[in-house]
Amino acid sequence: MFLADLTWPDLDPAAAYTLLVPVGSTEQHGPHLPLGTDTAVASAVASALHDAAPGLVLAPALPYGAAGEHEGFPGTVSIGEDALRTVLVEYGRSACRWASRLVLLNGHGGNVAALRSAVTLLRHEGRDAGWLSCVADVPGVPLDAHAGRYETSLLAHLHPGLVRTDRAEAGDTRPLREVIGELRAGGIAAVSPNGVLGDPAGASAKEGARLLAAITATASSAVTAWDPDPGTGRLRPPQA
């Protein structure tokens, strides 16, 4: 059930719908990945969840987020944390007038603070909302911070024609904990002139398929378990 394609009588007022909303970002992803990378990943995970459980309702993606750290690069459009929080709160208040549950599938790390705050408020108001990030640990694949092998493999699988392999190059490969201070002070550009935190070398579509399957499985188990963290609203998988 694709929300944008439905008419209002297609939705039964007595049904208990779960609405899936991909939340992404429009931001630089190095010289080789598209600006819509985070939205593409979140949308792909949401689509996979919907395909596995067609009773879910899949909403159009929200393609803008809190991405101020990337504004040193052309093409980035950030609406900021406060605006994103407001959008998510008002979205949830409206959608939960007919949907029993709201799942926000996040594709961009910079959105997390707004998601925590918005979903916590929605739950305090009595709305059954939860969020989760589109990420999973896969043995042998480094979980680099931005536009490295992890995201490059995902895009090579999802949208190979949008990956500029001839431009792919390593950026700052230090762990995020070592650069976070510089990043917060001056943005990604102050840390990595090409916008990459990691190294895309070794990325492949085959690896991207493995990653998507792992992310989808993790997300599916969390949605099925429906165990929101009391302090953040993040959906926890059964083993957490």
Image (cartoon, helix red, strand yellow):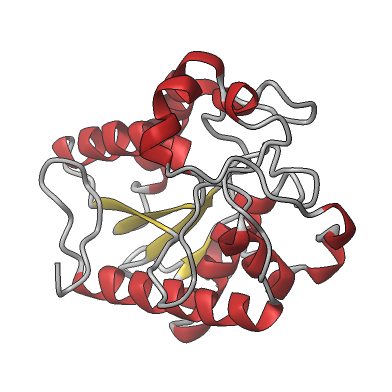
Residue 164, visible in the rendered structure: yes
Reply above or below: 70 against 7.
above
Residue 91, visible in the rendered structure: no
Choose between 187 and 78: the one closer to the eye. 187
Q: Is residue 113 left or right of residue 33?
A: left
Reply above or below: 122 against 77.
below
Residue at the location (61% across, 36% down)? Answer: 64
Choose between 136 and 101: the one closer to the eye. 136
Reply above or below: 205 against 122.
below
Query: Residue 101: where, in percent of width, then height?
Result: 30, 58
Task: Give the quadrant of residue 138.
Answer: bottom left
| Quadrant that contains the N terminus | bottom right
Query: Residue 226: where, in percent of width, then height?
Result: 20, 66
Query: Residue 18: where, in percent of width, then height?
Result: 36, 65
Q: Is residue 136 left or right of residue 163?
A: left
Query: Residue 32: where, in percent of width, then height?
Result: 79, 51
**Total number of numbered discs in the rendering:** 0
| Quadrant that contains the C terminus | bottom left
Residue at the location (52% across, 68% down)? Answer: 45
Taking the view exactly as shown, the residue that stands out farthest to the left is 230
Q: Is residue 104 left or right of residue 236?
A: right
Task: Give the quadrant of residue 177.
Answer: top left
Residue at the location (47% across, 85% down)? Answer: 52
Q: Is residue 193 left or right of residue 90?
A: right
Residue at the location (67% across, 59% down)? Answer: 200
